[in-house]
Amino acid sequence: MLETSRLWGVAALALLAGCATAPEPAAPPEAPRVEAPRGPSAEQLAAAAAEEARALLAQAETDIQRARAKRALWQQAWLDLITAREAVAAKEHARAALHARRASDFARLGLEQLTYPSVR
């Protein structure tokens, strides 16, 4: 009997010791802070618009030269090219891009018109 009471005593002590040293609940981990991605700055957008306007102007000048060499240049293409050059000089990049695209389109249409049959 003494033996079983010791066994129960050891079991009770082990149980109490286990309860006394219970780990504290860990605080939930903080969620990592993620910053929203920022878009390009105003200066970067302006630089990109200027670059696009200059590229479109260069393409329009090439198309105009090609149409002029084949004597298929339309007057509106030439006027739009001049307007695009003036807009680039005035740093109005949206207007420059618009007129450069139009000049390019009219120059291509003039070249395309050469493939049509002539009218009698």
Image (cartoon, rainbow, N blue to C red):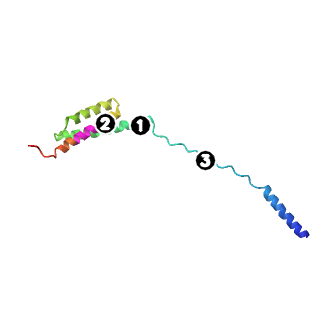
Position of residue 63 in the picture relative to residue 44 (left or right): left
Q: Is residue 10 above or below residue 99?
A: below
User: Residue drawn at (32%, 39%), measured in percent from left and top?
Assistant: 55
In the picture, measured across the screen, residue 102 lies left or right of residue 6, that is: left
Q: Answer whether residue 90 is visible to the viewer in this image.
A: yes
**Image check: 100 left or right of 110?**
right
Q: Nearer the viewer, mark 3 or mark 1?
A: 3
User: Which amino acid type is shown beneath numbered disc 1?
Assistant: Leu
**Which residue is labeled 2 in the image?**
98
As shown in the figure, which amino acid type bears the numbered disc 3? Ala
Which of the image's four quarters has the N terminus?
A: bottom right
Whichever of labels 3 and 1 marks the residue nearer the N terminus, that label is 3
Say which quarter of the image contains residue 85. Answer: top left
Instruction: Tell me which residue sits at (21%, 42%) in the image.
Output: 109
| Pointers 2 and 3 in contact (C-beta within 8 Å) | no
Q: Secondary structure at mark 2?
A: helix
Measured in 3D between alpha carbons, the distance from the residue under mark 2 to the one under mark 3, in whole angstroms, is: 48 Å
Badge 1 element: helix
Label 3: state its secondary structure: loop
Rendered image quadrant of residue 57: top left
- Mark 3 highlights which residue? 31
Measured in 3D between alpha carbons, the distance from the residue under mark 3 to the one under mark 1, in whole angstroms, is 34 Å
Which mark is on residue 77?
Answer: none
Q: Specify the amino acid type for callout 2.
A: Leu
Q: In terms of depth relative to the viewer, which is nearer, 11 or 86?
A: 11
